[in-house]
């Protein structure tokens, strides 16, 4: 109920309703058989993007554990994958990037559930991109959600999934 009230008709930057993004993410997290706090955090992932978001008030409302998960997922949003490519030098650079990403993630994320919820959120976003209308006259679809942007987002998400899974497999 809290998510429904807070999100209302708000849209993500891709044009998806925040409530749909959150419930889709929570469904993925539940399919992964994570705990109730992780599912609850998935339902609240868009809250840090709300105007006037206050971390302390949020923690008081939902509890410290859920708040830490939600805020950790929001902070992970700043991580972007570097562009890939072929060739030995690029492969070496991507290996260095994966190692640096692993170190950064381990330093900033004390809870693996943060990473899993973020991956679930990106997966839900990709599901939306595949199914969303591309009608330029549709006011619900912002300019940033056009096909070229979707392709770039999908490549970045795939690279990020690969980098993160590779980084943690060597941890």
Image (cartoon, rainbow, N blue to C red):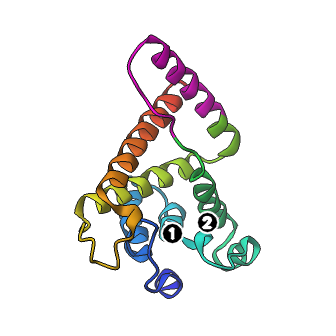
Mark 2: give few (<14), some (14-19) or many (20+) Cα within 10 Å: many
Does the magenta stretch mainly form a helix, a strand or a loop? helix
Pick the residue in front: 80 or 163.
Answer: 80
| Residue identifier under label 1 | 40
Rendered image: mark on residue 75: none
Q: Residue at x 47, y 29 (%)?
A: 166
Pick the residue in front: 98 or 148.
Answer: 148
Image coordinates for residue 57, horizontal then vertical, percent: 73, 78
Image coordinates for residue 94, horizontal then vertical, percent: 50, 24
Callout 1: SS: helix
103 vs 80, left or right, is right
Q: Residue at x 49, y 81 (%)?
A: 7
Is residue 164 at all visible to an observer of this figure?
yes
| Residue identifier under label 2 | 66
Is residue 171 at all visible to an observer of this figure?
no
Magenta residue span:
81-103
Q: Residue at x 68, y 76 (%)?
A: 53
């Amino acid at each position: 109920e809290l998510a429904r009230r807070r999100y209302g008709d708000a849209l993500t930057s891709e044009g998806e309703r925040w409530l749909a993004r959150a419930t889709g993410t929570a469904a993925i997290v539940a399919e992964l058989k994570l705990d109730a706090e992780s599912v609850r955090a998935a339902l609240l992932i868009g809250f840090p993007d709300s105007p006037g978001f206050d971390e302390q008030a949020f923690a008081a409302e939902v509890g410290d554990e859920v708040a830490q998960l939600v805020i950790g997922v929001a902070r992970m949003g700043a991580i972007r994958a570097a562009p890939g490519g072929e060739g030995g030098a690029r492969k070496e650079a991507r290996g260095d990037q994966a190692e640096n990403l692993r170190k950064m993630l381990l330093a900033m994320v004390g809870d693996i559930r943060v990473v899993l919820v973020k991956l679930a959120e990106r997966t839900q976003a990709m599901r939306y991109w595949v199914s969303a209308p591309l009608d330029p006259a549709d006011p619900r679809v912002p300019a940033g959600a056009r096909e070229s942007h979707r392709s770039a987002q999908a490549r970045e998400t795939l690279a990020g999934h690969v980098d993160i899974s590779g980084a943690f497999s060597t941890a």
